[in-house]
Image (cartoon, rainbow, N blue to C red):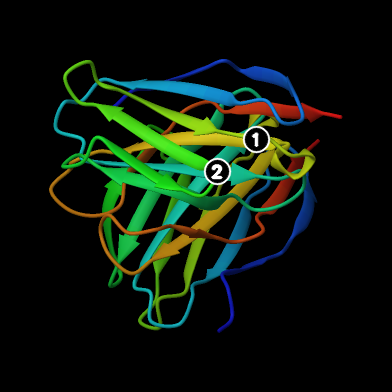
Amino acid sequence: GENVEQHPSTLSVQEGDSAVIKCTYSDSASNYFPWYKQELGKRPQLIIDIRSNVGEKKDQRIAVTLNKTAKHFSLHITETQPEDSAVYFCAAYEITGGGNKLTFGTGTQLKVEL
Amino acid sequence: KAGVTQTPRYLIKTRGQQVTLSCSPISGHRSVSWYQQTPGQGLQFLFEYFSETQRNKGNFPGRFSGRQFSNSRSEMNVSTLELGDSALYLCASSLGSTGELFFGEGSRLTVL
């Protein structure tokens, strides 16, 4: 099955700096890679996703890049703000013959310091 | 449009007991997935249902089971509870196979 590794597990940045979270996946057939943000005590929510037919996607201060050859994808947050502090999860969609089976990374605790 | 609703939100059980958790998906969503969240382990996939059929199953023992009803509501059951089953159980619904997952607030289970 799919295996997703995520690094770093914790990340502390100064407000205004950039943050980068990296993930690798094992199944070359995976074709959908979402990122979820989970604030303390709240549910995970999708912030951006990318499909295997594109290499980069951007949404305001957030961008995701995908390197299919190397089987890794990254989340980039620019001009970080205190409200960006949360746990971020990457995920890869595993092709199983149908259905949703997202395999998640173990999460990155991002702390944006003033 | 109402979001994904999970009940109960919190519950405490003792070892050996069983528990049933409920999930009502967003109206129109036919896919319901369940995840176990524990510190350091992230979100572990339990199973996914679509139109009352289990389409995928994660690597959990047979004590973990689920079902989906004709109205897309889903339940998961854990029998013979163990201390290690203490976790936040998240339900998520989706329109399609690779679409966005919409998570509920979760059911936090504590096993004593």
Q: Position of residue A111 (x, y in %)?
A: 75, 28
Q: Amino acid at mark 2?
A: Arg
Give SS at disc 1. loop
Residue B50 drawn at (x, y percent): 29, 66
Q: Quadrant of the N terminus of chain B?
A: bottom right
Q: Position of residue B57 (x, y in %)?
A: 32, 44
- Of label 1 and label 2, which has the lower sequence position? 2
The residue labelled by disc 1 is A79
Q: In terms of depth relative to the viewer, which is nearer, B75 or A3?
A: A3
Image-based side of A113 in relation to B89, left or right: right
Locate residue B52: give its quadrant. bottom left
Kindly indicate whether the residue at mark 2 contacts the one at mark 1 (C-beta within 8 angstroms): yes
Query: Could you tell me how many numbered marks the image carries?
Result: 2
Circle 1 crowding by C-alpha within 10 Å: few under 14, some 14–19, many from 20: few
Chain hosting mark 2: A
Q: Name the chain under label 1.
A: A
Q: Looking at the image, which is closer to me, B62 or A41? A: A41
Q: Which part of the image, by quadrant, shows the C terminus of chain B?
A: top right
The structure residue drawn at horizontal position 16% and vertical position 42%, both measured from the top left corner, is: A53
Residue matched to label 2? A61
Image point 16% across, 26% down: which residue?
Answer: A28
